[in-house]
Image (spheres, grey):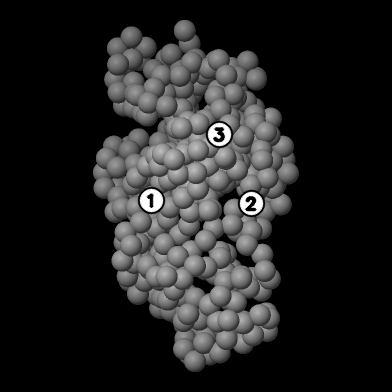
Amino acid sequence: MKYDYLIVGAGLFGAVFAHEMTKDGKNCLIIDKRDHIAGNIYTKKWADINVHWYGAHIFHTGNKAIWDYINQFAEFNNFINSPMAVYKDELYNLPFNMNTFSKMWNIRTPKEAKDIIEGQIKDLNITEPKNLEEQALSLAGRDVYEKLVKGYTEKQWGRDCRELPSFIIKRLPLRFTYDNNYFNDRFQGIPIGGYTEIVKKMIGDTPVILGKTYKEFMAENEAKSDRDEFGKILYTGMIDEYFDFCLGELEYRTVKFEHELMEEVDNYQGNAVVNYTEREIPYTRIIEHKHFEFGTQPDTVVSKEYPVEWKSGDEPYYPVNNERNNELYRKYEEMAAGEENVLFGGRLGQYKYYDMDKVIEKALEMVADERG
């Protein structure tokens, strides 16, 4: 059978593209190196709890068109992301807001909080931040930085904040209201039943081959098809891997997850997301998945997230968009532009971190280009 599109990657980008192209009467084939669909938004049912297997995913967007689009495939609850942060024996609300400042300094009014922060910034006398530490100090002052930014950031990046470039933190949102809603976006929630069901509905009857890399698939099919079997290829894997790393490897940060079923524990931490901001604690946060859907199950599942230095063969999660990597990506992008009938999409194919709503937006833009 001849396919109009071979879609490499059964994540959100590939699923949206497949759904739209199929609506247009195109034949698509999807392959994925993992043994499941849905990519990093994969949710696995465990003890009747939808576990976010590759980290917490809260859908949020300010774009009503994208919100309406995703709601075709699931009913969303009204979950509001309100994470907590633990520093030593202290517990703080996130994002940085009046609840945070009130706990930190035993104050009550926005003016008191602003005066303390502005006073700390003034005392530091940082005019041109030379690194991430100085940038964060110049935005939030010493207390917020040392308790809630420094250790967490160093764990995320595996570097001392004084060794990290200042542009990583362009701003630190300081809110002088008693509002624990992490996102400013108008639309927010968790799909009832999990994300995997959304992707399953998007894919529909499109054939999917799992546990197969692009290179393996093409090698197996080269003799009999010589690639004429496919009109176009949508590649959502690592762009440098597509070109066999001929110009060098792009850098990523990765995360290791430690999942645990706690039987006969109905509520472990009282919140879906709790960050641990001390450098000495190896994980950045603990996720308790049942709280995403207001679960009342007798057991619970928690996941600890450990940031890890990425090496070839690891799962790439976060592009390291520094000057060196961005320049290297631009060279790969030029090579990609010369590939006939090959499209590159998603955070790996375009070497950029996207929230879920932006993934959908970019996929639909590509669809529009294909439709002409």
37 shown above or below 119: above
Secondary structure of residue under mark 2 = loop
Q: How many marks?
A: 3
Label 2 close to label 1 by CB (< 8 Å): no
Task: Indicate which disc residue 305 carries.
Answer: 1
Expressed as whole percent of the image width and height from the top left, the position of residue 82 reads 59, 57
The type of residue carrying mark 1 is Glu
Secondary structure of residue under mark 3 = loop
Q: Residue at x 69, y 47 (%)?
A: 187
Expressed as whole percent of the image width and height from the top left, the position of residue 331 reads 38, 48
Q: Residue at x 47, y 39 (%)?
A: 299
For the residues labelled 3 and 1, the Cα–Cα distance comes to 20 Å
Q: Residue at x 55, y 15 (%)?
A: 205
Residue bearing the label numbered 2: 80
26 shown above or below 91: above
Residue bearing the label numbered 3: 194
For the residues labelled 2 and 3, the Cα–Cα distance comes to 16 Å
Specify which label sits upstream in the sequence, 2 or 1: 2
Specify which label sits upstream in the sequence, 2 or 3: 2
Secondary structure of residue under mark 1 = strand
Specify which label sits upstream in the sequence, 3 or 1: 3
Q: Quadrant of the C terminus?
A: top right
The type of residue carrying mark 2 is Ile
- Which of the pair 359/322 is nearer the observer? 359
Q: Residue at x 53, y 37 (%)?
A: 297
Please tell me how crowded label 2 is: few (under 14), some (14-19), or many (20+) other residues with Cα within 10 Å: some
208 shown above or below 90: above
